[in-house]
Amino acid sequence: MKKLMMVAALSALAACSQQAEKAAEEETVPVETAAPAEVDSASMVGDYEIKMADGKMAKTTINADGTYVDTGPDGKEIKGKFAMKDGKECFDPDGDEGEMCWTSTKPGADGSFTSTSDKGDTVTVMPAKK
């Protein structure tokens, strides 16, 4: 379940990073001097593919109602609540496990980025192909 939470967090981070990149492109201030774009939970809505450190793939969907669904490499689903807190993507799974928050890098040319949990786990997040 911890890996699925990580996947969900990464997915959220990917969406935030994509929004920040779009905002930076629209601004006339050079990226080096521009303040980071504010990202809200609504901007994270979407589907993401997550590559874990061991190479296994998972999926995360962030819904407009503030919920998320992680699907692990084994097909097991974890559902819970998603929120942006202090610039981090935070996932709070239903049940006993506590919330986990993630910090993401700026997306590359292909839209992918890395996301690191507060525990130090790192994953690669890619927007899901439609």
Image: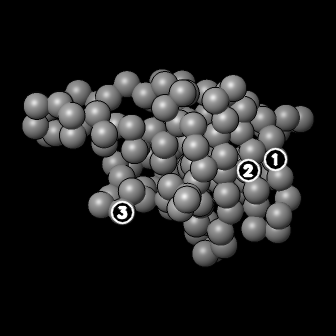
The answer to whether residue 84 is left or right of residue 66 is left
**Can residue 122 be spotted in the picture?**
no
- Whole-angstrom CA distance, mark 1 to mark 2, is 5 Å
Q: Are marks 1 and 2 in contact (CB under 8 Å)?
A: yes
> Which mark is on residue 78?
1
Q: Which residue is mark 3?
A: 110
User: What amino acid does circle 2 point to?
Assistant: Asp
Residue found 10% across the figure and 31% down from its top: 28
44 versus 117 height, above or below? above
16 versus 35 height, above or below? below
Q: Which element carries disc 3, helix, strand or loop?
A: loop
Q: Place residue 100 in its image quadrant.
A: top right
- Whole-angstrom CA distance, mark 3 to mark 1, is 27 Å
- Whole-angstrom CA distance, mark 3 to mark 2, is 22 Å
**Can residue 127 be spotted in the picture?**
yes
| Pointer 1 or 2: first along the chain | 2
Label 2: few (<14), some or many (≥20) within 10 Å?
many
| Pointer 3 or 2: first along the chain | 2
> Which mark is on residue 99?
none
Q: Position of residue 43 (x, y in %)?
A: 49, 32
Residue found 43% across the figure and 28% down from its top: 39
Nearer the observer, disc 3 or disc 2?
Answer: 3
Q: Which element carries disc 1, helix, strand or loop?
A: strand
Q: Position of residue 87 (x, y in %)?
A: 45, 29
Q: Place residue 26 in its image quadrant.
A: top left
> Which mark is on residue 70?
2
Residue found 66% across the figure and 46% down from its top: 61
Q: Place residue 20 in its image quadrant.
A: top left
User: What amino acid does circle 1 point to?
Assistant: Ile
The answer to whether residue 108 is left or right of residue 62 is left
